[in-house]
Amino acid sequence: MKLRPDGWVEGARRMPSPNRDERPAGSEISLLLLHAISLPPGEYGGDAIERLFTNRLEPDAHPYFQQVSSLEVSAHFLIRRDGEVVQFVPVHERAWHAGASSWCGRGRCNDFSVGIELEGSEEERFAPVQYSTLAALVRALRIALPLPDIAAHSEVAPGRKTDPGAQFDWARLLADLARG
């Protein structure tokens, strides 16, 4: 994988989301924010996440979708269970993934973070290939961006969010990055 000057990553499938805007002037991208998502909850492999992030999720397709279909959300990347990387927003733009959030005393994490969603749930282990793909993506991003910090959604929005959850193997990710 390689980050191109236009903010898109070579090797990622591109699916542009309208749920993005410009970062505030002078914002240094310094945080990688990890999330977990499955739609419907606990189900993998469909196109519902992509539909949600591109405002095309049909509320009548599943009872749960009625709760989320009107949300305007996105992330920069989605890493599927099979390791495929889908990119929704170029990294120099702000994706709408963190919501009300704070990291190290700095609010509005979307302003200075890159959001990566892992297809999964807090109750199940993530697939081994997701860790290797995540490490490769982080290494590619760190060539062009400082990204000194990696955090969980639950750390920037405590009490409101719990992902990626206790099943996420932080030691494995850090070991994969150290081998890089």
Image (cartoon, helix red, strand yellow):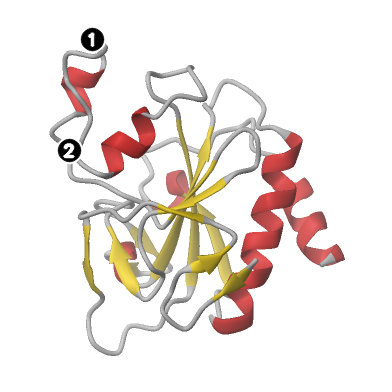
- Looking at the rendered structure, the kind of residue marked 2 is Leu
- Looking at the rendered structure, the kind of residue marked 1 is Pro
Choose between 43 and 171: the one closer to the eye. 43
Instruction: Indicate whether 136 appears above or below 99.
Output: below
Q: Quadrant of residue 160?
A: top left
Where residue 4 sits: x, y (%)?
Answer: 51, 78
Whole-number angstrom distance, CA of label 1 to CA of label 2: 15 Å
Residue at image location 41% in from the left, 58% down from the top: 76
Residue count near mark 1 (Cα–Cα under 10 Å), binned few <14, some 14–19, many ≥20:
few
Q: Is residue 52 left or right of residue 87?
A: left
Where residue 10 sits: x, y (%)?
Answer: 57, 67
Residue at image location 51% in from the left, 25% down from the top: 45
Residue at image location 44% in from the left, 24% down from the top: 46
Q: Is residue 140 left or right of residue 29?
A: right
- Badge number at residue 63: 1
Can the viewer see residue 160? no
Where residue 179 sits: x, y (%)?
Answer: 86, 64
Instruction: Indicate whether 2 appears above or below 74.
Output: below
Residue count near mark 2 (Cα–Cα under 10 Å), binned few <14, some 14–19, many ≥20:
few
Residue at image location 24% in from the left, 52% down from the top: 100
- Badge number at residue 3: none
| Residue farthest along the top direction in this orientation | 63
Name the secondary structure under disc 1.
Answer: loop
Can the viewer see residue 143? yes
Instruction: Indicate whether 96 appears above or below 44.
Output: below
Task: Report which residue position mark 2 lands on.
Answer: 71
> Disc count in the image?
2
Where residue 49 sits: x, y (%)?
Answer: 37, 34
Q: Is residue 81 left or right of residue 155?
A: right
